[in-house]
């Protein structure tokens, strides 16, 4: 996926509203825009005339003229207002979205109602999530997930579902990750090294556990994920360092201290001090 292509992003977002028995949502977005453009030039034109002129069902046009919109259209407008459809590889906005996406993959998720959430273990992690949400213009709230009264999760309050759909359009799984089949975001294959490094460093920071009897910086990532996914993840790490990265047991990836340092040190905003396992 080329995140610099507005059409690609809008289409992928619209796809989250797709139904098998209906035209692709993006096609309906485009039809709606055509109808509204014609109506704005000639406010007295009715649905029957527009139906003949645009070769669209009169009933659909009449509904739009009465104020309805295609499903997902207003949500796409919300994402557009945030600037998420106009990204660049080197922009601060995409840098924040990329790290938030890595957080969803490694220590968070998208709930069934399309609500993104991010798990944190320390005050530093919480501060980082809040900074990223601020950079992405997301409103959020801290909530608790355990039995004590301490917050341990940041939830996107608004725009919640549109943000969740956008992250899903970029590749993030929805629902329980243990029950889903998914891969890393395919934009990583096109992304500059800095973007891949920020994604990988955040993943290691959130999921990496210390390896007993190894160098202090060495980490293991253990996840119950399909082998193809774990191999994708190992490949991402390996593309960023010449140091040792190997598969351990079936659900494990082992990174030497040198590998962790060369991957994470250049990503100065990521500190390897956590062991979040969500």
Image (spheres, rainbow, N blue to C red):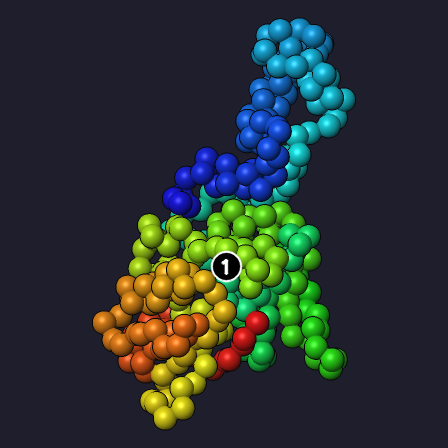
Q: Is residue 260 visible?
A: no
Q: Quadrant of the C terminus?
A: bottom right
- The x and y percentages for residue 151 are 68, 75
Which residue shows up at 54% across the image and 75% down it? 277
Q: Nearer the viewer, residue 177 or 141?
A: 177
- What count of labels does the image hold? 1
Q: Is residue 212 visible?
A: yes
> How crowded is the residue under tag 1: few (<14 C-alpha within 10 Å), some, or many (20+)?
many
Which residue shows up at 55% across the image and 64% down it? 178
- Residue assigned mark 1: 101
- The x and y percentages for residue 116 are 61, 58
In the image, residue 95 sits, relative to residue 270, either above or below, namely above
Which residue shows up at 41% across the image and 39% down it? 5
**Outermost residue to the bottom:** 213
Question: Picture quarter containing residue 260?
Answer: bottom left
- The x and y percentages for residue 225 are 48, 65
Q: Nearer the viewer, residue 238 or 44?
A: 238
Q: On the picture, is 154 further left or further right than 188?
A: right
Q: On the picture, is 61 further left or further right than 193?
A: right
In the image, residue 8 sits, relative to residue 116, either above or below, namely above
In the image, residue 115 sits, relative to residue 141, either above or below, namely above
Q: Secondary structure at mark 1?
A: helix
Q: Nearer the viewer, residue 246 or 118?
A: 246
């Amino acid at each position: 996926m080329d995140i610099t292509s507005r059409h690609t992003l809008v289409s992928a977002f619209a796809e989250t509203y797709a139904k098998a028995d209906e035209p692709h949502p993006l096609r309906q977005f485009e039809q709606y825009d055509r109808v509204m453009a014609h109506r704005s030039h000639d406010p007295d034109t009715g649905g029957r005339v527009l139906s003949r002129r645009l070769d669209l069902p009169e009933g659909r046009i009449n509904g739009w003229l009465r104020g309805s919109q295609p499903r997902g259209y207003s949500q796409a407008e919300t994402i557009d207002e945030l600037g998420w459809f106009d990204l660049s590889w080197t922009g601060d906005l995409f840098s924040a979205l990329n790290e938030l996406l890595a957080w969803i993959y490694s220590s968070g998720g998208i709930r069934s109602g399309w609500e993104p959430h991010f798990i944190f273990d320390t005050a530093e992690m919480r501060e980082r999530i809040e900074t990223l949400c601020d950079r992405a213009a997301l409103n959020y709230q801290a909530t608790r997930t355990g039995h004590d009264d301490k917050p341990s999760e940041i939830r996107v309050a608004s725009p919640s579902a549109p943000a969740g759909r956008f992250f899903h359009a970029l590749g993030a799984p929805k629902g329980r990750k243990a029950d889903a089949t998914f891969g890393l975001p395919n934009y990583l294959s096109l992304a500059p090294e800095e973007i891949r490094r920020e994604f990988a460093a955040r993943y290691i920071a959130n999921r990496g556990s210390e390896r007993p009897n190894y160098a202090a910086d060495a980490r293991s990532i253990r996840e119950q994920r399909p082998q193809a996914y774990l191999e994708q993840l190992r490949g991402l790490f390996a593309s960023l360092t010449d140091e040792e990265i190997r598969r351990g047991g079936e659900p494990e990836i082992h990174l030497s201290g040198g590998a962790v340092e060369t991957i994470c040190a250049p990503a100065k905003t990521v500190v390897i001090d956590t062991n979040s396992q969500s």
